[in-house]
Image: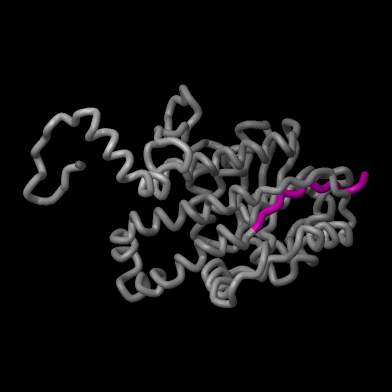
Amino acid sequence: MTATVNEETVGEFTPPNPEEVGVGYDEYMGLHKLIAAEFSLHIGAWSPIGERKPARTLLDLSNRTQDKQTEHHIKTLAMNPGEHLLDIGCGAGLPAIEFVKASGVRATGINVSRGQLAEAVKTAEAEGLTDRVDFRYGDAMALEFPDETFDSALSIEVFAHLSDRQKAFHEAARVLKPGGYFLVSDFTLRGEPTEEQLTAYLQTWHCMPPITPAKIMEMAATAGFELIQVENMTQNTAFTGELMGLLYGDRRAEIIDLYGPEATAEMDYVIPLVRTFFREHLGSYLFLLRKPA
């Protein structure tokens, strides 16, 4: 039989015999399948074997996934040294900075979050890259740049927030040079979510309702873009929702300190809905587009 762990037994240890090991695995097979893995019970290779700074926590793992995504974008756009990149919705600036470091390009990032822009500027200063990367406030639907300014453009999970995606496609096409590439991702809808799930997603993420991949490609074509490549990234979307749900539960005490018990109580209701929406109904596609030469 397996031992019972409680306050009275903490500190006690008796080496298990083979029968106890077997019975323990038999008894907790169901638990293992729910919290570890369905097919085996081993430590998974969450970080590539031999990686110098392996992920040790769920947040570390999430950070690594962001890095891997940016590496894929750099490889896909394949820019040349000296070219100029526009990052539409640049977040806290790390993707644009990584493009500059990896490809030798110049980069301009725009964002509507002043807090993220402040972080982006601080990071660029710390990296000594302020002469090659510029961050400023800007609206994707009304870009304040002359026609044919940039060699390539990037916009990752930004169009989902826009009230007029079509206008943003036209603006991206306008500021790109002929022959320029535009790498853009957007969220799509899978199945039929409940009204409660969809509302939780829209209000929490300040998004517009997800649309179909076909509609996104239609908007891009209307703006004059040619479709070069499309990738279904939905498997990453589903896992991201699971990870956010786990991190929320794990760090709830810190969230209370940051936002207060009343706001956290509201999150307690919303987070499970958003998690199931990500897992069951939210898709994601990455499109590589080209403005005709």
Q: Position of residue 204 (x, y in %)?
A: 52, 69
Is 119 on the left or on the right of 261, as rendered?
Answer: right
Is 42 on the left or on the right of 105, as rendered?
Answer: left
Residue at the far right: name it: 293
Location of residue 166 with respect to 293 vertically, above or below: below
What's the magenta region?
Answer: 283-293
Residue at screen point 32% across, 45% down: 28
Q: Nearer the viewer, residue 68 or 269?
A: 269
Q: Main secondary structure of the magenta part?
A: strand
Q: Is residue 153 visible?
A: no
How is this picture coloured? one colour
| Picture mark count | 0
Q: Nearer the viewer, residue 202 or 190?
A: 190
Q: Nearer the viewer, residue 110 or 163?
A: 163
Quarter of the figure with the N terminus = top left
Q: Position of residue 80 (x, y in %)?
A: 75, 32
Q: Nearer the viewer, residue 95 or 271?
A: 271
Quarter of the figure with the C terminus = top right
Residue at screen point 88% across, 57% down: 221
Is 238 on the left or on the right of 159, as rendered?
Answer: left
Residue at screen point 67% across, 65% down: 191
Residue at screen point 40% across, 54% down: 247
Q: Position of residue 59 (x, y in %)?
A: 42, 46
Q: Is residue 182 visible?
A: yes
Q: Is 15 inside the magenta-drawn segment?
A: no
Residue at the far left: name it: 8
Q: Quadrant of residue 263?
A: bottom left
Q: Is 291 inside the magenta-drawn segment?
A: yes
